[in-house]
Image (cartoon, grey):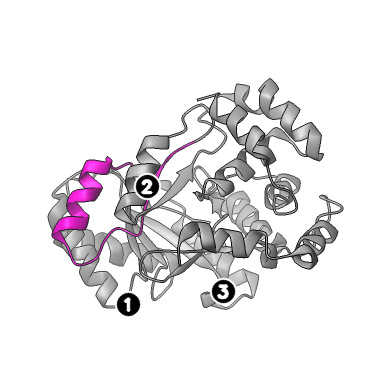
Amino acid sequence: MKRRTFLKKSLFAGGAAMLGARALFANPTETTNMQNAVPDYVLNNGVHIPILGYGTWNVRGRDGQQAIEAALEVGYRHIDSAAYYRNEDIVGAAVRASGLRREEVFVTTKLMWGMDADGEAAKREFAKSLKALQMDYVDLYLIHAPYGDIKSIWAAFCALHEQGRAKAIGVSNFSTELVAQLCEEFPVKPALNQIELHPFHQQVQTQAALDKLGVATESYSPFGTGDTRILKNETLTRIGEKYGKTAAQVILRWQIQRNIITIPKTARRARMIENLSIFDFALSDEDMQQIAALG
């Protein structure tokens, strides 16, 4: 299914659906389960991924596990982890503690950042990740960054995918040229490229190139990296006021309307719910143009 068709059907499927979303999010402090509000994005191999997920960078220890458990409780069904984050164990523990079936939660993890690896090393690292997660498979396995023998690593990723141990495979922090090489030389394309993307770093040309390759764009750090100015930006705040929304909600809605998968992170339950509460409004073309000007 084409991305635009999918999103149009999922997010604007009629007045009754929109009214249901409004009712669900009438009180953003409620802990009502919201998972049914988040539409799936269909990757190029047919795998469904919730278009809004929960990022876990720097989420560790008992407090981190409790945060992930809270995210699952309020409705997130897509958890993004990585070997580099040193938190795969608590991600697995949180999924098990949630009482949800394994197939109800989309779990991403990544090959260790910075490894000068080859294909065999990648397979060993994958086995370590499964052991830490205490899972038989992951829904998405990514090369965290373009280090090591990329072609050998990707061949190993293809084998893991064919075995069903990684339902989808992809990359992170890759140039579009390198993504194109993988698409041309291997039978399995990357499902997505996870990159830094926010209103101050919009990656429009990168997304357009990935679209042409049939590769999805996923955003990490949707609120910027350590720069709080983005959430105080006058344009984003003014747009939010029109809809009774925060600047953060406007940013996430802007990404969704650009057909971008996004994984915001927060340890605060109220913010988790706030970040989920973006499917009861739509930005106008004028709003989208004003945000585009920020880039």
Amino acid type at circle 1 is Gly
Determine the residue positioned at 53% across, 62% down.
5
Q: Is residue 266 visible?
A: no
Determine the residue positioned at 22% across, 49% down.
180
Q: Is residue 193 left or right of residue 257?
A: left
What is the spatial separation of the Cα atoms under label 1 and label 3, in whole angstroms? 17 Å
Q: Is residue 122 left or right of residue 286?
A: left
Task: Answer with mark 2 or mark 1, whichever residue precedes in sequence.
Answer: 2
Q: Quadrant of the N terminus?
A: bottom left
Q: Nearer the viewer, mark 3 or mark 2?
A: 3
- Residue 195 in magenta? yes
- Label 3 crowd (10 A; few <14 / some 14-19 / many >=20): few
Secondary structure state at the residue bearing disc 2: helix
Secondary structure state at the residue bearing disc 1: loop
- Which label number is shown at residue 104? 3
Task: Out of 11 and 88, give the one closest to the viewer.
Answer: 11
Residue under label 2, please give it. Answer: 84
> From which residue to which does the magenta span run?
172-197
Residue 107 lies, with reference to residue 116, above or below; the image says below
Task: Answer with mark 1 or mark 3, whichever residue precedes in sequence.
Answer: 3
Task: Answer with mark 3 or mark 2, whichever residue precedes in sequence.
Answer: 2
Does the residue at mark 3 contact the one at mark 2 (Cβ under 8 Å)?
no
What is the spatial separation of the Cα atoms under label 2 and label 1, in whole angstroms? 23 Å
Determine the residue positioned at 67% across, 29% down.
236
Residue under label 1, please give it. Answer: 164
Amino acid type at circle 2 is Tyr
Q: Is residue 185 left or right of residue 226?
A: left
Task: Count numbered badges in the picture.
Answer: 3
